[in-house]
Image (cartoon, rainbow, N blue to C red):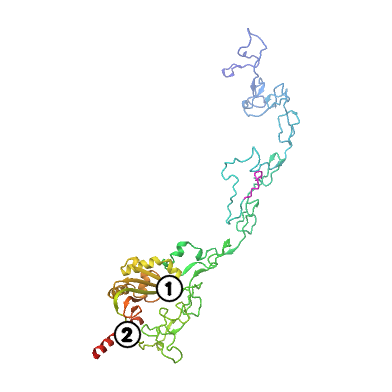
Amino acid sequence: MDQPALGRRSNTVYSCPAKAPVQGKGRHDVSRLLIGGCMIPQDASYAAHAEVHVPDMCTTPADFERGCMFPRAANYDMTAVQPDNCLFNTNGCTDSRAVNYNPEATHDDSSCIIATLGCTMQGQYTGNPYSVASNTPQYRSQDVGVPLRGVGDVDWPGTATMMPAVMNYRVTANVLHGCILRIEGCMDSTAVNYDSSATANGNTWCIPVILGCMMPYTSHGNVNYLVNIADRSHYKDGLGLNFVAMATVDSGRNGCVVERIGCTDSLAYNYDAHATSTSQNSDGHCWPDETGCLHPGASNYGCVRKYEYDQGPLLLTPCSTLGSTRPANSYEFLVTSHDGTLCNFEAPPPSPPPAECQGSCSYTLVSEVLTSFSVAEAEAVRPRLIESFANAASLELTAVTLTILAGSAILRFEAAVANAAAAAALQTQLVAVMGSKEAASNLLGIPVLAAPSFTTVITGDLTDDNAAVIGGAVGGSVGGLLLIFVVVYIMMKRKKSKVEA
């Protein structure tokens, strides 16, 4: 007012405020704003003319006689020189315990609502306006994530069913406090799928602990695993042998027994220390430690006896599974150890000379192969077997027929040829590529137990009423000896005819 910055300062004379109705010098009463300043007498910036205390105008700012300075306020303080909150007549709740307490209210209007603590959250599916929209993803879904089929489906008896979101909803509560969320899950700490955060188990969700091998049986494996078993190097090995379908906890590496087909008899000749299963085919049969004749040139090859019976006639018939009179799948007399003293090398009586073709005849080269496969296993790869044999014989697939006989699996290939010379040439060709059991195994792609045999069958207009059979097994075995005796017999007959002439 006095412009003290310009040196115009007086405690008794003041400049008139702007637009004051003053026409001349002297003392006048005019409306003006109150003068602010520091009103603390002890402060260095104390202003005696100040009418309103302004703390920031003091050298040391501080409050001084605070109070409501509005005369119409309910808490007007006529002695106050520093403005403070003013309270005007206001209706409202004056109870500090109420939810709607109004600290500025001056008159209680009976609107107080006493606080009631509790969970105020509504359910997930209730009436409008709280219901979830039906197009919400997974709306009322019945699927839950549990590791067992048929367990944990949410049951919805009707559309009015309420699916609570919390466990402790309180309808009378008006202050949100202490909600416990509803978390569906298994609350049994001994179960496989125990959920420590679950608060509700409204369904049969708990899965008991059932310890067992969870590796399936070989028969339950992938179809390619079963069909292509011959293409695998370790076809004797399978999957789980002690599979437990109801197991919920895998017993681990030491609990599952892997199927290994083989002989499990520790006293047998072919005992397999790693075998766990004895199959019905040759891979799993146990062979007793039988001593007999294993010389391929012996007439009783594969037999456990030298004589047909004790000190009886010499046994001159081979006892191998091919050409034997006993069942081909019989293993109780299978020789596993060689004893040369049990072998007979006496020549068997010669076979009758082969019949001669007198007119139209057909020639068929027959090859028999003994394998360790079962009939079912061989049938599964029949097309591949025919293709392999046909390629080895340089024939069309239609020119080869395959008959699979029981007793492990005996493969009988038949190929029609033009004449005896063609049969001999084809036999020579086949002997070169599959004459041994190893070569035959490589060619056919399956385990072969013995060298294949080759025989030429002649049918048609012969000198006798029966089909003629010539040839024999390859490799100098018994069939080869028979063929030699046939040749010797024919030569002796021809020599005798010349002498008689």
Between the residue at mark 1 and the residue at mark 2, the CA separation in whole angstroms equals 29 Å
- Please identify the quadrant where the C terminus is shown: bottom left
User: Which amino acid, mark 1?
Assistant: Leu
Which of the 4 image quarters holds residue 381? Answer: bottom left
Q: Is residue 162 magenta?
A: yes
Does 469 appear above or below 389? below
User: Which amino acid, mark 2?
Assistant: Phe
Q: At which x and y percent is residue 40?
A: 67, 26
Which of the 4 image quarters holds residue 242? Answer: bottom right
Q: Which mark is drawn over residue 485? A: 2
Q: Nearer the viewer, residue 46 or 488?
A: 488
Q: Which mark is drawn over residue 405? A: 1
- How many neighbours does mark 1 have within 10 angstroms: few (below 14), some (14-19), or many (20 or more)? some
Start and end of the magenta stretch? 154-163
Left or right of 2, for residue 314: left
Does 168 appear above or below 459? above
Q: Nearer the viewer, residue 22 or 372?
A: 372
- How many neighbours does mark 2 have within 10 angstroms: few (below 14), some (14-19), or many (20 or more)? some
Q: Main secondary structure of the magenta part?
A: loop
Left or right of 148, for residue 465: left
